[in-house]
Image (cartoon, helix red, strand yellow):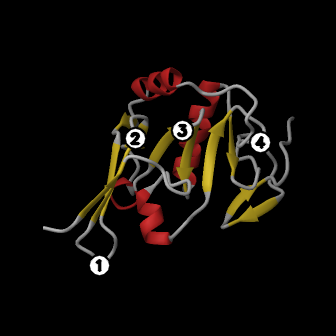
Amino acid sequence: MGLILQCDFVIASVASVAALTVAGMGYDVHITRRTPWWADEGEQITTQEWAAVVAADSELEMVQVARVSPRGQDAVLEYRHAWLAQMVTHPERDAHGAWLDWRDGRIVVKHPDELLLKKMREIAGVLRAHVQGDDCEYYDEGTLPAHSRNGRRVIIGGRVDS
């Protein structure tokens, strides 16, 4: 059997162990009420709100642990967090995780695809929040694309409200 590495903390903003081990350090997208997402001030999403959203959504499950084997290695990397959920209906969940990690008053996803971004927008609607990338671009419904990053249509620097 291979080596098992375990950590009970987040290093360098790691929400998806699979994304870290497969693609290196990556790009986070946040469900947040703060503007910008990293601001110290502003309303937070509570763990109680997050738990209620996960419990009410049949596509989500609070898994609390993520495990992945790096390509070509016998090691298993494990990330544990009490508020780690997974989109269990995501077709790539076994290969790439589809993990949503609550931390510091926001939900963080690493390298979300269009399906996961759609789910993030749904969750943000329930939580009265918005979906914002590391570079402050918004992924919310109703925004007009002003820039493309990695094939995603996004707004850089602000929200366009109709």
C-beta proximity under 8 Å, tags 2 and 3: yes
Q: Is residue 128 left or right of residue 3?
A: right
Image mark count:
4
| Residue 59 placement, left or right of 124 | left
Q: Please name the residue shown 80% across and 52% down the image.
A: 155
Label 3, residues with CA under 10 Å away: few <14, some 14-19, many ≥20 = many
Q: Residue at x 67, y 25 (%)?
A: 128
Identity of the residue drawn at 55% across and 66% down: 25
Mark 1 in CB contact with mark 3 (< 8 angstroms)? no
Give the Cα distance between marks 4 and 2.
Answer: 24 Å
Mark 2: give few (<14), some (14-19) or many (20+) Cα within 10 Å: some
The residue carrying mark 3 is 103
Q: What residue is pinned by disc 1?
A: 72
Q: How many residues crowd mark 1 within 10 Å: few (<14), some (14–19), many (20+)?
A: few
Q: Nearer the viewer, residue 114 or 84?
A: 84
Mark 1 and mark 3 lie on one chain; the one further toward the N terminus is 1
The amino acid pointed to by label 4 is Pro
Q: Which residue is mark 4?
A: 36
Dot 3: element: strand
Task: Give the Cα distance between marks 3 and 4.
Answer: 15 Å
Q: Which residue is mark 2?
A: 81
Counting residues from the N terminus, which is met first, the one under dot 3 or under dot 4? 4
* Residues marked 3 and 4 touching at CB (< 8 Å): no
Instruction: Give above or below for 2 relative to 91.
Output: below
Work out whether residue 80 or residue 54 is closer to the camera in this orientation and state it. 80
Q: Is tag 4's residue or tag 2's residue first in the polypeptide sequence?
A: 4
Image coordinates of residue 28 in percent, x first then y, are 60, 54
User: Residue visible at 42% across and 68% down?
Assistant: 21
Measured in 3D between alpha carbons, the distance from the residue under mark 2 to the one under mark 1, in whole angstroms, is 26 Å
Q: Residue furthest bottom?
A: 72
- Calculate the distance from the C-alpha at mark 1 to the C-alpha at mark 3: 31 Å
Q: Secondary structure at mark 4?
A: loop
